[in-house]
Image (tube, rainbow, N blue to C red):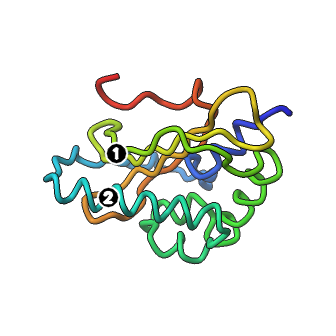
Amino acid sequence: MRFLAPALLMLATAPVAAQTTAPAAPVAAPAPVKLTPEQETKLTALGKTYTRWFFAGLADSLAGVFDAGMLAKAEGVAGITAMMQQISERAGFPTKVLVEKLTYRNGMPQYWYEAEFSEFSNEPVVVRWVMNAEGKVIGSGMNPKSAAPKPDGV
C-alpha cells in the first residue's frame, strides 16, 4: 500500500495566507531549550500520552495541548480528526513499537515514536511531537522513517 507522505505532514504545513500589500514580518523560530533530566522525563511521558491520544482518536484532547499557532496550522479539532482518519486508512494501526524517546530537533525537545504499522509494511513510521519546555505542542510530523527529519546530532 502506498503511504501518502503529504497527508502525514498535514500538521506541519501552514495554510496559505491572504495576500497583503506589505510583506509580513518573518516569524522567529523558538529559542533552543535546555531541559533538566526531570523536564525530559516529563516531556517523554507527555509525548507518550499525546501519541496514545492520537491513535485513540482524541482530537479534542490533542487540540488542548497544541499552542495557538500549531492549532491554527492543524485547522483545529476538525483538521486533527481528518488527519487521524487519513493515517488510519493509509497506514492502519501500530503493531510493534520500535523506539520511544525524547530527542531534539533544531534545539527543541521532540518526542520520537517509531513503530511498524498494520497497513504499511515498507518501513517503520515515525510520529514526532515537538514541544516547548511546558509540554505544549509547537510542531508535529508523521513520516516513513526514511523521510523523517533527523534529530539534532544524528
- Answer with left or right where residue 72 lies relative to residue 57: left
Q: Position of residue 119 (x, y in %)?
A: 80, 41
Q: Position of residue 11 (x, y in %)?
A: 59, 52
Give the quadrant of residue 76.
bottom right
Q: Residue at x 55, y 46 (%)?
A: 127
- Answer with left or right where residue 73 lies relative to residue 95: left
- Answer with left or right where residue 151 lies relative to residue 9: left
* Mark 2 crowdedness (10 Å alpha carbons): few <14, some 14-19, many ≥20: many
The C terminus lies in quadrant: top left
Q: SS of the residue at dot 1?
A: strand
In front of the other: 150 or 30? 150
Q: Residue at x 53, y 38 (%)?
A: 98
In front of the other: 43 or 117? 117
Question: Which labelled disc corresponds to residue 43?
Answer: 2
Name the residue furthest front.
96
- Answer with left or right where residue 148 lies relative to residue 78: left
Disc 2 to disc 1, how far (Cα)? 7 Å
| Vertical position of residue 30 compared to residue 99: above or below | below
Q: Amino acid at mark 2?
A: Leu
Identify the residue under disc 1. Answer: 102
Tag 2 and tag 1, C-beta contact below 8 Å? yes
In front of the other: 99 or 62? 99
Q: Amino acid at mark 1?
A: Leu
Q: Residue at x 56, y 44 (%)?
A: 97
Q: SS of the residue at dot 2?
A: helix
* Mark 1 crowdedness (10 Å alpha carbons): few <14, some 14-19, many ≥20: many
Q: Position of residue 49 (x, y in %)?
A: 47, 65
The N terminus lies in quadrant: top right
Q: Position of residue 124 (x, y in %)?
A: 63, 33
Q: Earlier in the sequence, mark 2 or mark 1?
A: 2
